[in-house]
Image (cartoon, grey):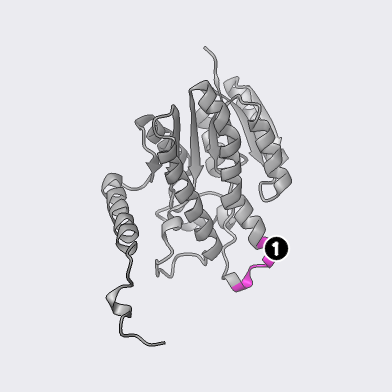
Amino acid sequence: MTRTLALITGASSGIGASFARLLADDHDLVLVARRADRLDALAEELRRSRGVAVEVLPADLMTRDGITAVTDRLSAGDVRLLVNNAGAGGYAPLVDVEPADIDRLFTLNAVAPVQLVRAALPAMLEAGEGAIINVASLLAFSAGLADARAPRRTLYAAAKAATAAFTRTLTGELAGTPVRTQLLLPGVVATEWNQGAGHDVPWAMTPEDVASASLAGLHLGETVCTPGLEDQTAALDALLAAETSLVTGGNQPRVATRYADVRA
């Protein structure tokens, strides 16, 4: 039996490494991350313990050169599962973020997934098979959340909201094709992320459970996977209803009555 090839970004630790370990039973792997030493160690572990073919591709997806290295690899056309997992928080008030870091963080968190999907899609469509998992965050929907426990997240929430909108819209675009998509929305996860802060949060999920839920959800045909949400269908139905009300209700030829008697 021919093994499917999966490419995983952010594979050196956390959720990405968990995806690699879970997929190793029936996939060969291309592992992407900045830290070549960590990738090499994981690759050796998987080759030795699972007999899997593993290709290591060090690349910094905060940079255009890093994105090009991975899109060039995807252009070979043999990847059938793409897991866009790489990301960074950059948690800080906007005024404290260096201007140069804005571009780097948006490139990693929002631009890289789009570019990698674009590079992988043609071969998946031509082959008549393929799947894409884009890892975002529940914080993509937190813009109006006034919770003191939430991080200062202006850039991160904006980028992950872009990934969420991109993936959900792409799902509609690919309806009727054999390519499956999934938007993965983890909450707090006990990883090295944000200096390992998740390890101190009692409701943090393990990265293994996040990756396992995602793959189970893909098998179930879920285009959105929120690993900790029990009644996901009701929540997504409510979200769609709110979006529909906003978009259709706001597309009117006249301004709303609340503005009628206001003078600038």
Residue drawn where x is 56% and y is 51% of the image: 110
Q: Residue at x 70, y 44 (%)?
A: 66
Q: Is residue 39 left or right of residue 190?
A: right
- Give the residue at x 63% y 24%: 47
Residue highlighted by disc 1: 100
Q: Viewer-proximal residue, 126 or 236?
A: 126
Q: Where does the image place residue 108, in percent across and percent down from the top left?
A: 62, 50
Residue at position x 54%, y 34% in the image:
82
Query: Which residue range is magenta in the image?
Result: 95-101
Main SS category, magenta section: helix
- When asked about the image quadrant of residue 39, the answer is top right
Give the vertical position of 159 relative to 25 (above or below). Answer: below
User: Does the magenta segment cover residue 259?
Assistant: no
Which residue lies most toward the top here?
Answer: 1
Residue 152 picture location, percent across and down: 52, 67
Q: Is residue 143 left or right of residue 234?
A: right
Q: Is residue 218 visible?
A: yes
Task: Say which element carries label 1.
Answer: helix
Q: Say which of 169 and 116 sits in front.
A: 169
The quarter of the picture where residue 138 lies is: bottom left
Q: Residues within 10 Å of mark 1 (few under 14, many from 20)?
A: few
Residue furthest to the front in view is 253
Residue 15, given in percent of the width and then of the height, sits at 52, 42
